[in-house]
Amino acid sequence: QRLRALFQYKPQNIDELMINAGDFIYVDPTHQCDVSEGWVVGTSHRTGCRGFLPENYTEKAHESDTWVKHREYVFVTASRSSTQTEREYNVKLNGEAHNPSMSRSGANVLSTQNAPLRRAVLVMRHGERVDQVFGKSWLQQCLTPDGKYYRADLNFPSALPKRKDSMKQFECDPPLSCCGIFQSRLIGEALLDQEVLVSYVYSSPALRCVQTAQHVLQGLELNQKVKIRVEPGLFEWTKWEASKVIPNFMTVAELAEASYNVDTSYRGNFPLSSLVPSESYEDYLSRSSAPLLLLFAFSGVSGVILIVGHGSSLAACTRPLMGLPSRDSSDFAQMVRKIPSLGMCFCEELKEQNKWQMVNPPVKTLTHGANAAFNWRYTIMED
Amino acid sequence: QRLRALFQYKPQNIDELMINAGDFIYVDPTHQCDVSEGWVVGTSHRTGCRGFLPENYTEKAHESDTWVKHREYVFVTASRSSTQTEREYNVKLNGEAHNPSMSRSGANVLSTQNAPLRRAVLVMRHGERVDQVFGKSWLQQCLTPDGKYYRADLNFPSALPKRKDSMKQFECDPPLSCCGIFQSRLIGEALLDQEVLVSYVYSSPALRCVQTAQHVLQGLELNQKVKIRVEPGLFEWTKWEASKVIPNFMTVAELAEASYNVDTSYRGNFPLSSLVPSESYEDYLSRSSAPLLLLFAFSGVSGVILIVGHGSSLAACTRPLMGLPSRDSSDFAQMVRKIPSLGMCFCEELKEQNKWQMVNPPVKTLTHGANAAFNWRYTIMED
């Protein structure tokens, strides 16, 4: 049987098939025996990948359509049986069997009061940083000759937090841009919409990460309830620090004074003084995953643990949890470059099987365009 | 005398010089007689341009530095005498003679209760639209098979306004993205910070423009006080409409029902029924400037008139006001392409001289980066 996709479907689980409107999908009737209502297993003509797809996103294709290639796709991480159970569970919960794509997020499970709280980790990269937009000289661009901060472009934050040492220290530890605050807030609000129950928040000591955590918690309306634990072990691989020194981070006391919602009683798992410049890849990986592995050793910990770190944190914090080997360090660098602001990954524990699997985060991606500077003089006035 | 710039200085008025840190500036002592305290007239070695610059942004250069070129720059629009008066006025108002760059915005003048309200026009382009990020098929991406809207990416708005005809009409008249709402709100808040007194708001009938006006007014905390006048004459040059038809805009009644703050009693200067597909360039220009020219014929109109339109509006609404000729239509297209979301220009009336001049808008530019979609599966999981 051949189907033609009517709509785009973005996979919500690792065993599902990405389809675009117009794609042809080959469906073998002998493979459909243990598939739940409304779903089929198919192979995409375009990609050659195989997976589950919602039947009502497709129509029967004309028999005249040609077929060239199809190959098998092996699922490595997710076991069939567990996700099958989860699908039925979600569909029942929502009573929306007509639209399976709306009822597949892990958050629905987490938010159900009767279900036991599954343990999960949401790892995210910080929001847009000012130097990402305005370059290395960003601080020079927004300081007056007598050293006062002013907002040279509306994407600079309206003020910089107070710190005891020099403003110059912000150069190695830049804050979020206004757009970065917007991104963080939006993700927090989306997590609230999905009723994701965040029980702990850990942040890299970098200001941009603490700020991201702060605005995500505000969006979640949790800023009075959950405090940010500043964990030096979550800082970026120091080999990548352009300055070749460890930045002078704002202290937890300074952050608290600047109204950041930090846990002043938390003592880092990895002390700040142990962060050394140009550390080895192995040292970086081991300090990145240690806080989480330690935390999950306590069975009392439940709900979603939010980790706000750097692009590198997405892999460094989660792969050890899933028992996956670390990547080659050059592949690692290439991977990290692809991770946008507020890029996220989500791991949940399968307690009965004593393992962790990566599934879709409880909220969607955030994709937006750039906005260029604009000079009316050269554009509107001059001919 | 030769100066070296210590800091970047971005011009705040048409007669000022753009300098970057490290630039050399040639200063002729015989040209400094009618220059106010703290300012010098100089010629940039780098650009060859001449203009005013704040002296405390520079230091004396070493005599050994070489000089190759300098040319004269003729100021066409701004007359020396008027801006000179304005500068002194502003500096006095703020008492910040040490930092002239902070006290140059026209808004300071406008916000002074004792000064007569100068008439000015702020023309802005709408914010980021969904199809700019997600392409022409954006609506297909966020409709379920049974035609319900869902937020396929967090940059899609949380809901679409209700309209009486089909959702399909949004395809020719797309809404703002979440990022577009953020941009509009930010500009509104910045205008409030500068105490810009907006007395009238005119918007193109395109949904993205009405939404931009709405969020700018919210940022200005004026949404209860100033109503949006939907003016069909402000719509984009219809020759540029990809669909070759006039979109079915939401009616003013529908907009009001969807909680947009529109003036239901306003009758457009240019009736919607007169908008025709593929109109001539001349017809487009004449309908774009007519509403403003008519408005300013009434001497009772004062304060800042906000116009929310399209990239094309920035030139089409302002050049006739300043008595400038229209551009060649191909130059016009090229100019419009350069205008970012919320790109702005600002014209103020010099009543005593019975003319209008373009000066820096009362708020800064808004520059931010793009955020790409991200798939954890291909990035974090696969090797």
Image (tube, coloured by chain):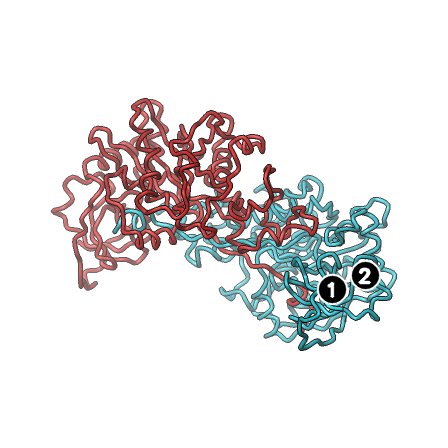
Chain colours: A cyan, B red
Label 1 chain ID: A
Observer-nearest residue: A52 or A79? A52
Cα separation, mark 1 vs mark 2, equals: 9 Å
Three-letter amino acid code at disc 1?
Ile
Up the image or down, A353 lies above or below A370; here it is below
Q: Are marks 1 and 2 in contact (CB under 8 Å)?
A: yes
Instruction: Write down the quadrant of residue A349 in the picture.
Output: bottom right
Q: Which residue is mark 1?
A: A14
B196 horizontally vs A182: left or right:
left
Whether residue B217 is visible here, answered yes or no, is: yes
Q: Residue A281: name its quadrant.
A: bottom right
For image coordinates 33% across by 29% down, the residue present is B295
Q: Position of residue B357 (x, y in %)?
A: 26, 38
Q: Secondary structure at mark 1?
A: loop
Question: What is the number of the mark on residue A83?
Answer: 2
Q: Chain of mark 2?
A: A
| First in sequence: mark 1 vs mark 2 | 1
Q: Nearer the viewer, residue B122 or A239?
A: B122
A1 in relation to B183, above or below: below
* Of A119 and B272, the residue lying toward us: B272
Give the amino acid type for the residue marked by disc 2 in the picture: Thr
Residue at 22% x, 40% y is B78
Q: Residues within 10 Å of mark 2 (few under 14, many from 20)?
A: some
